[in-house]
Image (cartoon, rainbow, N blue to C red):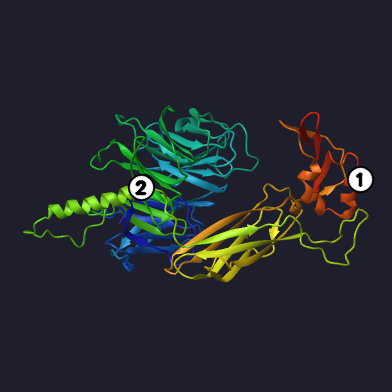
Amino acid sequence: MSLFKAREWWHAQPGQIEEFDGACMCIANIDNDPSGLAKIVTGSLQGNLRIYSVQNRDYKAEDLLLEQELEQAILQVEAGRFSSNGGMQLAILHPRKLVVYNVQSMGGSYLQMNKLYEHYLEHTAANMTYGPFGGVQGVDYLCVQSYDGQLCFYECEAFAFARFLPNYLIPGPLCYCEQSDSVVTCNASFELESYKYKVLAAATADKHTGSAPLAGHQVAKKVQADWKLILGEMAIDIRPGKLTQGLQSYQSDIVILCEHNVFVVSSAGQITFQKRLEYHPACCCTYPVPGAKVPGGVENLLVATHTRALLVYRGNVLSWAARMDMQPVAVQVADLGPNMRGMIVTLDDTGHVVVSYLGTDPLLTPVGFVEGKELDYEAMAKEHRALAAIIREQSGGKRVEPPDKLIMRAQVPSRFDSAREGGEWDELGNAKNFVRRLTVKLYLTYQGGASSVDNVHLSVRAPEPVSADQPNIVVPSISGDASDPSIVLITFLSGNTCLPASNTATVVATFMTGTGEPRAQSVDIELPLCLFATVVPPVKNAAFKLTVAANRTPPQIVTLFEDLISQAGPGTSQSLMNNSAGANVLSVQYYSGQDCTILVSKNGGGYRLQSG
Protein backbone atom coordinates (compact mmCIF):
# COMPACT_ATOMS: atom_id res chain seq x y z
CA MET A 1 0.00 0.00 0.00
CA SER A 2 1.44 3.35 -1.01
CA LEU A 3 2.49 5.74 1.75
CA PHE A 4 1.83 8.84 -0.35
CA LYS A 5 -1.93 8.62 -0.47
CA ALA A 6 -4.69 10.41 1.40
CA ARG A 7 -6.39 7.91 3.72
CA GLU A 8 -10.17 8.11 3.68
CA TRP A 9 -11.84 8.28 7.08
CA TRP A 10 -15.43 9.23 6.25
CA HIS A 11 -17.41 10.05 3.13
CA ALA A 12 -20.97 11.00 2.19
CA GLN A 13 -22.68 11.08 -1.20
CA PRO A 14 -25.97 12.86 -2.00
CA GLY A 15 -28.71 10.60 -3.22
CA GLN A 16 -29.43 12.52 -6.45
CA ILE A 17 -27.50 14.08 -9.29
CA GLU A 18 -26.49 17.61 -8.30
CA GLU A 19 -23.76 20.11 -9.14
CA PHE A 20 -21.44 21.90 -6.70
CA ASP A 21 -18.88 24.68 -6.99
CA GLY A 22 -15.80 25.71 -5.03
CA ALA A 23 -17.74 28.08 -2.72
CA CYS A 24 -20.45 25.53 -1.85
CA MET A 25 -18.82 24.23 1.36
CA CYS A 26 -17.92 25.67 4.75
CA ILE A 27 -16.98 24.11 8.09
CA ALA A 28 -17.91 25.67 11.45
CA ASN A 29 -19.76 25.12 14.71
CA ILE A 30 -22.83 26.39 12.96
CA ASP A 31 -25.32 25.32 15.65
CA ASN A 32 -23.24 26.92 18.46
CA ASP A 33 -22.75 23.57 20.18
CA PRO A 34 -21.16 24.06 23.63
CA SER A 35 -18.72 21.26 22.85
CA GLY A 36 -17.45 23.23 19.85
CA LEU A 37 -17.99 20.33 17.43
CA ALA A 38 -17.62 21.57 13.84
CA LYS A 39 -20.18 20.68 11.17
CA ILE A 40 -19.76 20.39 7.40
CA VAL A 41 -22.19 22.57 5.42
CA THR A 42 -22.72 22.05 1.68
CA GLY A 43 -25.08 23.72 -0.78
CA SER A 44 -25.72 22.69 -4.37
CA LEU A 45 -26.61 24.72 -7.44
CA GLN A 46 -29.93 22.88 -7.43
CA GLY A 47 -30.77 24.57 -4.09
CA ASN A 48 -30.28 21.68 -1.62
CA LEU A 49 -28.57 22.47 1.68
CA ARG A 50 -27.01 19.72 3.81
CA ILE A 51 -25.26 19.79 7.17
CA TYR A 52 -23.14 16.81 8.27
CA SER A 53 -21.62 15.88 11.61
CA VAL A 54 -18.73 13.41 11.53
CA GLN A 55 -19.09 11.24 14.63
CA ASN A 56 -17.15 8.08 13.87
CA ARG A 57 -15.46 6.36 10.98
CA ASP A 58 -17.71 5.56 8.00
CA TYR A 59 -20.92 7.37 7.18
CA LYS A 60 -24.15 6.65 9.08
CA ALA A 61 -27.64 7.96 8.51
CA GLU A 62 -27.58 10.00 11.74
CA ASP A 63 -24.54 11.93 10.47
CA LEU A 64 -26.85 13.94 8.19
CA LEU A 65 -28.31 16.50 10.60
CA LEU A 66 -30.15 18.65 8.06
CA GLU A 67 -31.25 18.38 4.44
CA GLN A 68 -33.45 21.17 3.16
CA GLU A 69 -34.47 22.38 -0.28
CA LEU A 70 -34.26 26.18 -0.62
CA GLU A 71 -35.79 26.35 -4.13
CA GLN A 72 -33.01 28.62 -5.42
CA ALA A 73 -29.47 27.92 -6.56
CA ILE A 74 -26.92 28.15 -3.76
CA LEU A 75 -23.84 30.02 -5.00
CA GLN A 76 -21.94 30.25 -1.71
CA VAL A 77 -22.27 29.33 1.96
CA GLU A 78 -20.37 31.08 4.78
CA ALA A 79 -20.42 30.86 8.57
CA GLY A 80 -19.81 33.96 10.69
CA ARG A 81 -21.09 36.38 13.28
CA PHE A 82 -23.75 37.95 11.10
CA SER A 83 -26.08 39.05 13.91
CA SER A 84 -25.68 41.34 16.89
CA ASN A 85 -27.20 38.62 19.07
CA GLY A 86 -23.89 36.76 19.10
CA GLY A 87 -22.98 33.23 18.10
CA MET A 88 -22.48 31.80 14.62
CA GLN A 89 -24.96 32.22 11.80
CA LEU A 90 -25.15 30.79 8.29
CA ALA A 91 -25.14 33.13 5.27
CA ILE A 92 -26.40 31.70 1.96
CA LEU A 93 -25.95 33.54 -1.31
CA HIS A 94 -28.53 33.01 -4.04
CA PRO A 95 -28.42 34.64 -7.49
CA ARG A 96 -30.82 37.42 -6.45
CA LYS A 97 -31.00 37.10 -2.67
CA LEU A 98 -28.75 36.99 0.41
CA VAL A 99 -30.26 35.14 3.39
CA VAL A 100 -28.88 34.71 6.92
CA TYR A 101 -30.13 31.80 9.05
CA ASN A 102 -29.77 30.85 12.67
CA VAL A 103 -29.20 27.09 13.02
CA GLN A 104 -30.44 25.40 16.19
CA SER A 105 -29.99 21.89 17.48
CA MET A 106 -33.24 20.03 18.18
CA GLY A 107 -32.41 17.41 20.75
CA GLY A 108 -29.00 16.67 19.23
CA SER A 109 -30.40 14.39 16.51
CA TYR A 110 -31.20 17.00 13.88
CA LEU A 111 -30.97 20.73 13.18
CA GLN A 112 -33.49 23.42 12.33
CA MET A 113 -32.93 26.69 10.43
CA ASN A 114 -34.66 29.95 11.32
CA LYS A 115 -34.42 32.89 8.94
CA LEU A 116 -33.05 35.99 10.64
CA TYR A 117 -33.10 38.41 7.70
CA GLU A 118 -32.68 38.57 3.95
CA HIS A 119 -31.59 41.10 1.35
CA TYR A 120 -32.92 41.14 -2.20
CA LEU A 121 -30.23 41.91 -4.74
CA GLU A 122 -30.76 44.33 -7.60
CA HIS A 123 -28.00 42.71 -9.68
CA THR A 124 -27.16 39.03 -10.19
CA ALA A 125 -24.66 37.91 -7.57
CA ALA A 126 -21.34 36.22 -8.34
CA ASN A 127 -19.70 35.69 -4.92
CA MET A 128 -19.34 37.25 -1.50
CA THR A 129 -16.96 37.77 1.40
CA TYR A 130 -17.33 38.81 5.02
CA GLY A 131 -15.38 40.24 7.94
CA PRO A 132 -15.25 43.00 10.53
CA PHE A 133 -15.37 45.82 7.97
CA GLY A 134 -14.17 49.16 9.34
CA GLY A 135 -12.77 47.55 12.49
CA VAL A 136 -16.15 46.72 14.00
CA GLN A 137 -16.03 44.47 17.07
CA GLY A 138 -18.03 41.30 17.72
CA VAL A 139 -19.85 41.13 14.39
CA ASP A 140 -19.12 40.41 10.71
CA TYR A 141 -20.46 42.42 7.79
CA LEU A 142 -21.16 41.00 4.34
CA CYS A 143 -20.02 42.11 0.89
CA VAL A 144 -21.63 40.74 -2.30
CA GLN A 145 -20.04 41.11 -5.75
CA SER A 146 -22.36 41.10 -8.75
CA TYR A 147 -21.67 40.15 -12.35
CA ASP A 148 -21.65 43.80 -13.46
CA GLY A 149 -18.97 44.84 -10.96
CA GLN A 150 -21.06 46.18 -8.09
CA LEU A 151 -19.99 45.63 -4.47
CA CYS A 152 -22.93 45.75 -2.04
CA PHE A 153 -22.11 46.04 1.68
CA TYR A 154 -24.54 44.92 4.36
CA GLU A 155 -24.26 45.65 8.07
CA CYS A 156 -26.32 42.77 9.42
CA GLU A 157 -29.98 43.65 8.75
CA ALA A 158 -29.20 47.02 7.16
CA PHE A 159 -27.94 47.86 3.71
CA ALA A 160 -24.84 50.09 3.97
CA PHE A 161 -23.83 51.19 0.45
CA ALA A 162 -22.95 49.93 -3.02
CA ARG A 163 -19.99 50.82 -5.21
CA PHE A 164 -19.01 49.90 -8.77
CA LEU A 165 -15.47 48.72 -9.47
CA PRO A 166 -13.68 50.60 -12.28
CA ASN A 167 -12.58 48.91 -15.54
CA TYR A 168 -14.76 45.91 -14.78
CA LEU A 169 -15.52 43.09 -17.22
CA ILE A 170 -16.03 39.77 -15.42
CA PRO A 171 -16.11 38.90 -11.70
CA GLY A 172 -13.02 37.46 -10.04
CA PRO A 173 -12.34 35.84 -6.65
CA LEU A 174 -13.10 38.07 -3.67
CA CYS A 175 -11.62 38.08 -0.17
CA TYR A 176 -11.32 40.41 2.82
CA CYS A 177 -8.01 41.16 4.54
CA GLU A 178 -8.70 42.10 8.15
CA GLN A 179 -5.20 43.47 8.89
CA SER A 180 -5.44 46.13 6.14
CA ASP A 181 -9.27 46.41 6.22
CA SER A 182 -9.33 45.90 2.47
CA VAL A 183 -11.33 44.00 -0.12
CA VAL A 184 -9.06 42.20 -2.61
CA THR A 185 -10.11 40.90 -6.04
CA CYS A 186 -8.69 40.17 -9.51
CA ASN A 187 -9.96 41.99 -12.60
CA ALA A 188 -10.14 40.92 -16.24
CA SER A 189 -6.78 42.59 -16.95
CA PHE A 190 -5.12 39.96 -14.74
CA GLU A 191 -4.42 42.59 -12.05
CA LEU A 192 -4.78 42.12 -8.31
CA GLU A 193 -6.64 45.09 -6.80
CA SER A 194 -7.07 46.14 -3.19
CA TYR A 195 -9.75 48.59 -2.07
CA LYS A 196 -9.81 50.12 1.41
CA TYR A 197 -13.16 49.79 3.10
CA LYS A 198 -13.06 53.38 4.33
CA VAL A 199 -12.29 54.61 0.81
CA LEU A 200 -15.21 52.64 -0.58
CA ALA A 201 -17.54 53.97 2.11
CA ALA A 202 -16.43 57.58 1.56
CA ALA A 203 -16.66 57.50 -2.25
CA THR A 204 -19.39 59.65 -3.75
CA ALA A 205 -21.62 58.80 -6.68
CA ASP A 206 -20.83 60.66 -9.88
CA LYS A 207 -22.65 58.51 -12.42
CA HIS A 208 -25.67 56.22 -12.17
CA THR A 209 -25.90 52.83 -13.85
CA GLY A 210 -29.02 53.79 -15.82
CA SER A 211 -31.47 51.87 -13.64
CA ALA A 212 -33.12 53.38 -10.59
CA PRO A 213 -31.53 52.16 -7.33
CA LEU A 214 -33.57 50.66 -4.57
CA ALA A 215 -35.17 52.94 -2.02
CA GLY A 216 -32.55 54.31 0.34
CA HIS A 217 -29.63 52.96 -1.73
CA GLN A 218 -26.85 55.34 -2.64
CA VAL A 219 -24.80 54.00 -5.53
CA ALA A 220 -21.35 55.28 -6.52
CA LYS A 221 -19.48 54.00 -9.50
CA LYS A 222 -15.94 55.37 -9.53
CA VAL A 223 -13.61 54.35 -6.73
CA GLN A 224 -9.82 54.31 -6.39
CA ALA A 225 -7.79 51.18 -5.69
CA ASP A 226 -5.33 51.31 -2.80
CA TRP A 227 -2.78 49.32 -4.85
CA LYS A 228 -2.61 47.12 -7.93
CA LEU A 229 -0.35 44.21 -8.83
CA ILE A 230 -0.02 42.64 -12.29
CA LEU A 231 -0.36 38.85 -12.10
CA GLY A 232 -0.31 38.07 -15.83
CA GLU A 233 -2.92 35.31 -15.47
CA MET A 234 -6.39 34.76 -14.07
CA ALA A 235 -6.72 34.05 -10.36
CA ILE A 236 -8.55 30.89 -9.33
CA ASP A 237 -8.80 31.66 -5.61
CA ILE A 238 -7.69 34.42 -3.22
CA ARG A 239 -7.31 33.76 0.51
CA PRO A 240 -5.80 35.61 3.47
CA GLY A 241 -3.12 33.78 5.42
CA LYS A 242 0.25 33.93 7.14
CA LEU A 243 2.78 31.95 5.16
CA THR A 244 5.76 34.26 5.81
CA GLN A 245 7.90 33.72 8.90
CA GLY A 246 8.07 36.52 11.44
CA LEU A 247 4.81 38.31 10.68
CA GLN A 248 3.39 40.46 13.46
CA SER A 249 -0.23 40.31 14.59
CA TYR A 250 -1.08 43.39 12.52
CA GLN A 251 0.49 41.91 9.36
CA SER A 252 -0.91 39.34 6.94
CA ASP A 253 -0.26 37.66 3.61
CA ILE A 254 -2.61 37.32 0.67
CA VAL A 255 -2.39 33.99 -1.18
CA ILE A 256 -3.40 34.08 -4.84
CA LEU A 257 -3.77 30.73 -6.59
CA CYS A 258 -3.48 31.20 -10.36
CA GLU A 259 -3.53 28.85 -13.32
CA HIS A 260 0.26 28.43 -13.41
CA ASN A 261 1.63 30.19 -10.30
CA VAL A 262 1.04 30.78 -6.61
CA PHE A 263 1.65 34.35 -5.46
CA VAL A 264 2.08 35.33 -1.81
CA VAL A 265 1.60 39.10 -1.45
CA SER A 266 1.83 41.28 1.61
CA SER A 267 -1.12 43.38 2.72
CA ALA A 268 0.69 46.38 1.21
CA GLY A 269 0.81 44.85 -2.27
CA GLN A 270 4.44 43.65 -2.31
CA ILE A 271 5.23 40.15 -3.63
CA THR A 272 6.72 38.07 -0.82
CA PHE A 273 7.44 35.06 -3.02
CA GLN A 274 6.14 33.34 -6.15
CA LYS A 275 5.97 29.61 -6.89
CA ARG A 276 5.76 28.24 -10.45
CA LEU A 277 3.41 25.25 -10.64
CA GLU A 278 4.04 22.22 -12.85
CA TYR A 279 0.41 21.15 -12.74
CA HIS A 280 -3.09 22.61 -13.09
CA PRO A 281 -4.45 23.58 -9.64
CA ALA A 282 -8.11 23.23 -8.70
CA CYS A 283 -8.48 24.81 -5.24
CA CYS A 284 -6.50 25.66 -2.11
CA CYS A 285 -6.74 26.57 1.58
CA THR A 286 -4.47 27.69 4.39
CA TYR A 287 -4.27 26.12 7.85
CA PRO A 288 -2.15 26.62 10.99
CA VAL A 289 1.04 24.61 11.25
CA PRO A 290 0.44 21.59 13.53
CA GLY A 291 1.80 22.23 17.00
CA ALA A 292 1.82 26.01 16.51
CA LYS A 293 -1.89 26.87 16.82
CA VAL A 294 -1.43 30.25 18.44
CA PRO A 295 -2.93 33.55 17.28
CA GLY A 296 -0.81 34.87 14.44
CA GLY A 297 1.10 31.64 13.96
CA VAL A 298 2.61 30.46 10.69
CA GLU A 299 0.29 28.63 8.30
CA ASN A 300 0.76 26.02 5.58
CA LEU A 301 -0.79 26.05 2.12
CA LEU A 302 -2.74 23.03 0.86
CA VAL A 303 -3.32 22.85 -2.91
CA ALA A 304 -5.55 20.31 -4.69
CA THR A 305 -4.76 19.66 -8.36
CA HIS A 306 -6.66 18.40 -11.38
CA THR A 307 -4.44 15.29 -11.29
CA ARG A 308 -6.11 14.22 -8.02
CA ALA A 309 -3.16 15.19 -5.85
CA LEU A 310 -2.87 17.04 -2.54
CA LEU A 311 0.26 19.18 -2.12
CA VAL A 312 1.35 20.73 1.18
CA TYR A 313 3.61 23.80 0.99
CA ARG A 314 5.48 25.30 3.93
CA GLY A 315 6.48 28.65 2.56
CA ASN A 316 7.63 28.04 -1.00
CA VAL A 317 8.88 24.51 -0.27
CA LEU A 318 6.81 21.42 -1.05
CA SER A 319 6.62 19.44 2.19
CA TRP A 320 4.27 16.58 1.29
CA ALA A 321 2.34 15.17 -1.65
CA ALA A 322 -0.42 12.58 -1.62
CA ARG A 323 -2.82 11.06 -4.14
CA MET A 324 -6.61 11.13 -3.87
CA ASP A 325 -9.43 9.05 -5.31
CA MET A 326 -11.55 12.10 -6.22
CA GLN A 327 -11.25 15.41 -8.06
CA PRO A 328 -12.07 18.14 -5.51
CA VAL A 329 -13.49 21.59 -6.22
CA ALA A 330 -13.15 22.72 -2.57
CA VAL A 331 -10.77 21.71 0.22
CA GLN A 332 -10.47 22.72 3.88
CA VAL A 333 -8.57 21.57 6.95
CA ALA A 334 -10.59 21.45 10.18
CA ASP A 335 -10.85 19.91 13.62
CA LEU A 336 -13.98 17.76 13.51
CA GLY A 337 -13.67 16.44 17.05
CA PRO A 338 -11.28 15.89 19.93
CA ASN A 339 -9.86 12.80 18.20
CA MET A 340 -10.12 14.15 14.66
CA ARG A 341 -7.81 17.14 14.50
CA GLY A 342 -6.35 18.41 11.27
CA MET A 343 -8.66 16.39 9.03
CA ILE A 344 -8.79 17.23 5.32
CA VAL A 345 -12.33 17.79 4.02
CA THR A 346 -12.82 17.76 0.24
CA LEU A 347 -15.88 18.29 -1.96
CA ASP A 348 -16.18 17.32 -5.64
CA ASP A 349 -18.55 18.72 -8.26
CA THR A 350 -21.14 15.98 -7.60
CA GLY A 351 -21.44 16.67 -3.86
CA HIS A 352 -19.25 13.79 -2.68
CA VAL A 353 -17.78 14.86 0.69
CA VAL A 354 -14.65 13.01 1.86
CA VAL A 355 -12.86 13.39 5.19
CA SER A 356 -9.30 12.08 4.95
CA TYR A 357 -5.89 12.39 6.58
CA LEU A 358 -2.26 12.17 5.54
CA GLY A 359 -0.26 9.25 6.86
CA THR A 360 -0.24 5.49 6.89
CA ASP A 361 -2.84 2.91 7.77
CA PRO A 362 -2.22 1.02 11.02
CA LEU A 363 -0.68 -2.44 10.68
CA LEU A 364 -3.49 -4.86 11.49
CA THR A 365 -1.36 -8.03 11.44
CA PRO A 366 1.99 -7.21 13.04
CA VAL A 367 4.84 -9.55 12.25
CA GLY A 368 6.23 -11.26 15.31
CA PHE A 369 9.90 -12.02 15.86
CA VAL A 370 10.74 -15.67 16.43
CA GLU A 371 13.45 -15.97 19.04
CA GLY A 372 16.07 -18.66 18.92
CA LYS A 373 16.27 -18.95 15.11
CA GLU A 374 19.86 -18.89 13.94
CA LEU A 375 20.74 -17.05 10.76
CA ASP A 376 22.64 -18.94 8.06
CA TYR A 377 25.05 -16.26 6.88
CA GLU A 378 26.76 -18.59 4.41
CA ALA A 379 23.46 -19.36 2.64
CA MET A 380 22.57 -15.66 2.62
CA ALA A 381 25.90 -14.78 1.00
CA LYS A 382 25.43 -17.51 -1.61
CA GLU A 383 21.97 -16.24 -2.50
CA HIS A 384 23.29 -12.69 -2.69
CA ARG A 385 26.02 -13.72 -5.15
CA ALA A 386 23.50 -15.56 -7.32
CA LEU A 387 21.14 -12.58 -7.43
CA ALA A 388 24.00 -10.18 -8.17
CA ALA A 389 25.09 -12.37 -11.10
CA ILE A 390 21.56 -12.33 -12.52
CA ILE A 391 21.38 -8.55 -12.19
CA ARG A 392 24.74 -8.09 -13.95
CA GLU A 393 23.68 -10.41 -16.75
CA GLN A 394 20.39 -8.59 -17.31
CA SER A 395 21.80 -5.08 -17.08
CA GLY A 396 25.08 -5.57 -18.95
CA GLY A 397 24.02 -7.87 -21.78
CA LYS A 398 22.19 -7.14 -24.97
CA ARG A 399 18.46 -7.30 -25.30
CA VAL A 400 17.29 -10.85 -25.80
CA GLU A 401 14.61 -11.21 -28.42
CA PRO A 402 11.73 -13.54 -27.59
CA PRO A 403 11.94 -16.95 -29.29
CA ASP A 404 8.39 -16.69 -30.65
CA LYS A 405 8.25 -14.30 -33.58
CA LEU A 406 6.95 -13.81 -37.10
CA ILE A 407 9.12 -13.46 -40.17
CA MET A 408 7.38 -10.79 -42.25
CA ARG A 409 8.44 -9.99 -45.82
CA ALA A 410 6.60 -7.75 -48.28
CA GLN A 411 6.68 -7.95 -52.07
CA VAL A 412 5.71 -4.57 -53.52
CA PRO A 413 4.89 -4.28 -57.25
CA SER A 414 5.89 -1.17 -59.13
CA ARG A 415 2.68 -1.00 -61.17
CA PHE A 416 -1.03 -0.84 -60.54
CA ASP A 417 -3.29 -3.84 -60.77
CA SER A 418 -4.50 -4.43 -64.34
CA ALA A 419 -7.35 -2.18 -65.52
CA ARG A 420 -10.58 -3.80 -66.55
CA GLU A 421 -10.97 -4.48 -70.23
CA GLY A 422 -13.45 -2.44 -72.25
CA GLY A 423 -12.90 0.78 -70.23
CA GLU A 424 -13.00 4.28 -71.64
CA TRP A 425 -9.81 6.16 -72.55
CA ASP A 426 -9.13 9.88 -73.03
CA GLU A 427 -7.22 11.58 -75.86
CA LEU A 428 -3.86 10.90 -74.17
CA GLY A 429 -4.62 7.22 -73.66
CA ASN A 430 -5.34 7.44 -69.90
CA ALA A 431 -8.08 5.24 -68.52
CA LYS A 432 -11.24 7.00 -67.38
CA ASN A 433 -13.01 6.08 -64.10
CA PHE A 434 -10.17 3.75 -63.25
CA VAL A 435 -9.75 2.94 -59.55
CA ARG A 436 -6.01 2.95 -58.83
CA ARG A 437 -5.26 -0.21 -56.88
CA LEU A 438 -1.95 -1.76 -55.90
CA THR A 439 -1.82 -5.17 -54.24
CA VAL A 440 1.11 -6.04 -51.99
CA LYS A 441 1.94 -9.62 -51.11
CA LEU A 442 2.90 -10.13 -47.47
CA TYR A 443 4.71 -13.40 -46.68
CA LEU A 444 4.35 -14.63 -43.10
CA THR A 445 6.26 -17.45 -41.41
CA TYR A 446 6.10 -18.38 -37.74
CA GLN A 447 9.27 -19.12 -35.82
CA GLY A 448 9.01 -20.46 -32.30
CA GLY A 449 8.49 -23.48 -30.13
CA ALA A 450 5.17 -24.54 -31.68
CA SER A 451 4.62 -25.66 -35.27
CA SER A 452 2.14 -22.85 -36.00
CA VAL A 453 0.34 -19.88 -34.50
CA ASP A 454 -3.37 -19.14 -34.73
CA ASN A 455 -5.50 -15.99 -34.93
CA VAL A 456 -2.92 -13.47 -36.04
CA HIS A 457 -4.39 -9.95 -36.29
CA LEU A 458 -2.90 -7.62 -38.91
CA SER A 459 -3.45 -3.85 -38.67
CA VAL A 460 -2.59 -1.86 -41.79
CA ARG A 461 -1.80 1.85 -41.47
CA ALA A 462 -1.35 3.64 -44.80
CA PRO A 463 0.00 7.17 -45.27
CA GLU A 464 -2.54 9.77 -46.32
CA PRO A 465 -4.11 10.11 -48.83
CA VAL A 466 -3.62 6.38 -49.52
CA SER A 467 -5.98 3.98 -47.76
CA ALA A 468 -6.05 0.23 -47.26
CA ASP A 469 -8.93 -1.77 -48.68
CA GLN A 470 -8.98 -3.88 -45.48
CA PRO A 471 -7.34 -2.07 -42.52
CA ASN A 472 -7.81 -5.10 -40.23
CA ILE A 473 -7.11 -8.65 -41.36
CA VAL A 474 -7.29 -11.87 -39.33
CA VAL A 475 -5.11 -14.76 -40.43
CA PRO A 476 -6.52 -18.02 -39.02
CA SER A 477 -3.22 -19.89 -38.93
CA ILE A 478 0.43 -19.33 -39.91
CA SER A 479 2.70 -22.33 -40.39
CA GLY A 480 6.24 -22.59 -39.11
CA ASP A 481 7.44 -24.15 -42.42
CA ALA A 482 9.71 -21.58 -44.12
CA SER A 483 9.23 -23.27 -47.51
CA ASP A 484 5.45 -22.79 -47.34
CA PRO A 485 4.76 -19.28 -45.97
CA SER A 486 1.31 -17.80 -45.60
CA ILE A 487 0.52 -15.12 -48.18
CA VAL A 488 -1.73 -12.18 -47.33
CA LEU A 489 -2.86 -9.80 -50.06
CA ILE A 490 -3.07 -6.16 -48.97
CA THR A 491 -4.68 -3.76 -51.44
CA PHE A 492 -3.90 -0.05 -51.26
CA LEU A 493 -6.16 2.58 -52.89
CA SER A 494 -4.87 5.99 -53.92
CA GLY A 495 -6.66 9.17 -52.86
CA ASN A 496 -6.74 12.86 -53.69
CA THR A 497 -7.50 14.57 -50.39
CA CYS A 498 -4.05 15.98 -49.62
CA LEU A 499 -0.35 15.92 -50.45
CA PRO A 500 1.48 12.87 -49.12
CA ALA A 501 3.90 13.37 -46.25
CA SER A 502 5.41 9.88 -46.52
CA ASN A 503 5.23 6.79 -48.70
CA THR A 504 5.70 4.31 -45.85
CA ALA A 505 2.88 2.00 -44.82
CA THR A 506 3.09 -0.01 -41.60
CA VAL A 507 1.64 -3.46 -40.93
CA VAL A 508 1.44 -4.51 -37.26
CA ALA A 509 0.88 -8.17 -36.39
CA THR A 510 -0.36 -9.19 -32.93
CA PHE A 511 -0.75 -12.74 -31.68
CA MET A 512 -0.65 -14.93 -28.58
CA THR A 513 2.07 -17.51 -28.06
CA GLY A 514 1.40 -21.03 -26.91
CA THR A 515 2.10 -19.97 -23.30
CA GLY A 516 -0.46 -17.18 -23.51
CA GLU A 517 2.01 -14.31 -23.81
CA PRO A 518 1.11 -11.46 -26.21
CA ARG A 519 3.49 -10.58 -29.02
CA ALA A 520 3.53 -7.74 -31.53
CA GLN A 521 5.67 -7.18 -34.62
CA SER A 522 5.64 -4.69 -37.45
CA VAL A 523 7.02 -4.25 -40.94
CA ASP A 524 7.34 -1.08 -43.02
CA ILE A 525 6.31 -1.12 -46.68
CA GLU A 526 7.68 1.47 -49.10
CA LEU A 527 4.86 2.23 -51.54
CA PRO A 528 5.68 3.24 -55.14
CA LEU A 529 5.22 6.79 -56.39
CA CYS A 530 2.42 5.80 -58.75
CA LEU A 531 0.04 5.59 -55.76
CA PHE A 532 0.49 9.31 -55.11
CA ALA A 533 1.09 10.95 -58.52
CA THR A 534 1.05 10.47 -62.30
CA VAL A 535 3.05 11.76 -65.24
CA VAL A 536 1.62 14.65 -67.27
CA PRO A 537 2.99 16.64 -70.22
CA PRO A 538 5.64 19.22 -69.20
CA VAL A 539 4.22 22.17 -67.25
CA LYS A 540 5.86 25.61 -67.47
CA ASN A 541 5.26 26.86 -63.93
CA ALA A 542 8.30 28.09 -61.98
CA ALA A 543 6.96 30.11 -59.05
CA PHE A 544 9.07 28.01 -56.65
CA LYS A 545 12.47 26.54 -57.55
CA LEU A 546 14.88 24.14 -55.89
CA THR A 547 18.28 23.20 -57.40
CA VAL A 548 20.11 19.98 -56.44
CA ALA A 549 23.78 19.79 -57.46
CA ALA A 550 25.44 16.48 -58.44
CA ASN A 551 29.13 15.52 -58.52
CA ARG A 552 28.72 13.24 -61.52
CA THR A 553 26.78 13.12 -64.75
CA PRO A 554 23.10 12.81 -63.87
CA PRO A 555 21.18 9.97 -65.53
CA GLN A 556 18.20 10.61 -67.74
CA ILE A 557 14.86 11.20 -66.07
CA VAL A 558 13.23 8.48 -68.16
CA THR A 559 15.59 5.98 -66.56
CA LEU A 560 14.95 7.22 -63.02
CA PHE A 561 11.15 7.27 -63.31
CA GLU A 562 10.68 4.34 -65.66
CA ASP A 563 8.08 2.70 -63.43
CA LEU A 564 6.08 5.94 -63.12
CA ILE A 565 6.17 6.63 -66.86
CA SER A 566 5.08 3.09 -67.65
CA GLN A 567 1.97 3.62 -65.49
CA ALA A 568 0.85 6.57 -67.60
CA GLY A 569 -1.50 6.08 -70.51
CA PRO A 570 -0.11 5.18 -73.93
CA GLY A 571 -0.73 8.68 -75.23
CA THR A 572 1.16 10.38 -72.37
CA SER A 573 4.11 7.97 -72.55
CA GLN A 574 4.39 8.33 -76.31
CA SER A 575 4.26 12.13 -76.14
CA LEU A 576 7.08 12.16 -73.60
CA MET A 577 9.24 9.82 -75.66
CA ASN A 578 8.64 11.71 -78.93
CA ASN A 579 9.39 15.11 -77.36
CA SER A 580 12.94 16.18 -78.03
CA ALA A 581 13.27 17.52 -74.50
CA GLY A 582 11.42 14.61 -72.98
CA ALA A 583 14.63 13.04 -71.80
CA ASN A 584 15.45 16.11 -69.69
CA VAL A 585 12.03 17.31 -68.48
CA LEU A 586 9.36 15.45 -66.53
CA SER A 587 6.21 16.87 -64.93
CA VAL A 588 4.46 14.95 -62.17
CA GLN A 589 0.96 15.80 -60.97
CA TYR A 590 -0.25 14.59 -57.58
CA TYR A 591 -3.78 13.26 -57.44
CA SER A 592 -4.67 16.18 -55.15
CA GLY A 593 -4.00 18.60 -58.05
CA GLN A 594 -0.51 20.00 -57.30
CA ASP A 595 2.24 19.57 -59.89
CA CYS A 596 6.04 19.42 -59.83
CA THR A 597 8.44 19.61 -62.81
CA ILE A 598 11.93 18.05 -62.77
CA LEU A 599 14.60 19.31 -65.14
CA VAL A 600 18.03 17.72 -65.57
CA SER A 601 21.03 19.76 -66.68
CA LYS A 602 23.87 17.76 -68.19
CA ASN A 603 26.14 20.79 -68.47
CA GLY A 604 25.45 22.09 -64.98
CA GLY A 605 25.49 18.63 -63.47
CA GLY A 606 22.33 18.75 -61.36
CA TYR A 607 18.55 18.77 -61.10
CA ARG A 608 16.01 21.55 -60.74
CA LEU A 609 12.60 21.07 -59.16
CA GLN A 610 10.02 23.74 -59.82
CA SER A 611 6.35 24.15 -59.05
CA GLY A 612 3.62 26.76 -58.95
Q: Position of residue 438 (x, y in %)?
A: 73, 60
Q: Amino acid at mark 1?
A: Asn
Q: Which residue is mark 2?
A: 395
Q: Where 483 falls versus 92 (above or below)?
A: below
Q: Where 590 falls versus 165 (above or below)?
A: below
Looking at the rendered structure, the secondary structure element under dot 1 is: helix
Residue that protrudes farthest toward the right in the picture: 427
Q: Amino acid at mark 2?
A: Ser
Q: Is residue 592 visible?
A: no
Q: Quadrant of the C terminus?
A: top right
Residue 504's label in the rendered image is: none
Residue neighbourhood size for the residue with mark 2, other residues' Cα within 10 Å, grouped as few (<14), some (14–19), many (≥20): few
Query: Mark 2 or mark 1: which comes first in sequence?
Result: 2
Q: Nearer the viewer, residue 143 or 578?
A: 578
Looking at the rendered structure, the secondary structure element under dot 2 is: helix
Residue at 52% x, 68% y is: 480
Q: Where 102 falls versus 289 (above or below)?
A: below
Q: Is residue 574 visible?
A: yes
Residue at 90% x, 56% y is: 429
Q: Which residue is mark 1?
A: 578
Left/right placement of residue 134 relative to residue 297 reads right
Q: Are marks 2 and 1 in contact (CB under 8 Å)?
A: no
Q: Position of residue 67 (x, y in %)?
A: 41, 64
State the CA–CA distance, disc 2 to disc 1.
65 Å
